[in-house]
Amino acid sequence: MKILLVYPSPFSNVFFRSFIEGFVQAGHEVAVCTGRAGGECDAFGALPAGTVTYEVDLPRGAAVRAHLGAVHGVRDAVRRFQPDIVHAHMSAAVFTTAIARQWQNTTIGTFHGLMYPLRTGLARSVIGVAERTAMKRLDQVQVVNRSDYNVVRRDCPRANCVVLRAGFGTDLRKFNPAAFDADARAAIRREIGLRPDAVVGAFVGRMVEFKGIPTLVRAFRRVVAQQRGAQLLIVGSTPLMTISPTFTSASTGMFTLSRFLFFFWSATVDNTVPLTLTPPSTSDTVSVPFN
């Protein structure tokens, strides 16, 4: 079987690599349609050998012209690869793929969190039209939480919608606290200056507001109130002060920067796993961890 995956950015290769490996090991042929790669993507790892790549400027936002501009590239990828299944991921790429669709090949869209239920006013209306239009042009709609499933059932009752029972894209052989013994945990804590008995919370992901970082920071205040030595580990891609006023205001009061440990993106992000037993997922859209 030939499978074409469509997602906005090559930075997501880090999530989709193991996904693709599973298909390849099962004997399928896989191609990827995603944004143009730069040298900064190297740290995120190459795709498995044999993966065909089509570079298309896929927008992540709501710019209609940008989506229309990407339509030709998606159609060209489908024409050249001739997949049995086209599988688009993330709201923006799902929308682009849906409006580009002129093919009969089975087409699936996975929303890693619907956007419009979280918005208000004009943004809710515009994004809602886009996401619902996409759903109606798909053979199957996949969502990652029960809340989004209920929204789809209510707003697009004819859509063939399923809830994914687990996340994907993370190598559980690496991201598994049980794989690290007490000595390994202690060694990594020493390396970054954490006490062996310190309570540590963690966030791993792009440091953008909709990932729920302000929510995590506000919630962690309660932890600090009960455990004065607690620290919050943030593994992300953007310095704290450039995220948003909401984040910086949420981190005032009881917090100082000494409560935060920052690890910007690297190829060794899995080394932070032993630091905490339960990395929280606070995303406003996904609502479940990628596991």
Image (spheres, grey):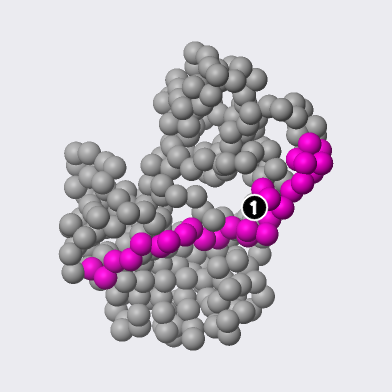
180 w.r.t. 101: above or below: above
Which residue shows up at 52% across the image and 40% down it? 280
Q: Residue 249 in magenta?
A: no
Magenta-colored span: 159-187
Image spot of residue 97 (x, y percent): 35, 68
Quadrant for residue 25, please give it.
bottom right
23 w.r.t. 189: above or below: below
The foreground one among 84 and 174 is 174
Q: Residue furthest top?
A: 253
Q: Left of 228 or right of it: where is 209? A: left
Image spot of residue 205 (x, y percent): 54, 44
**Of the residues shown, which amino acid type is indicated by label 1?**
Phe
Which residue shows up at 18% across the image and 57% down it? 154
Which residue shows up at 59% across the image and 20% down it? 227
The residue where tag 1 is placed is 175
Q: Residue 166 in magenta?
A: yes
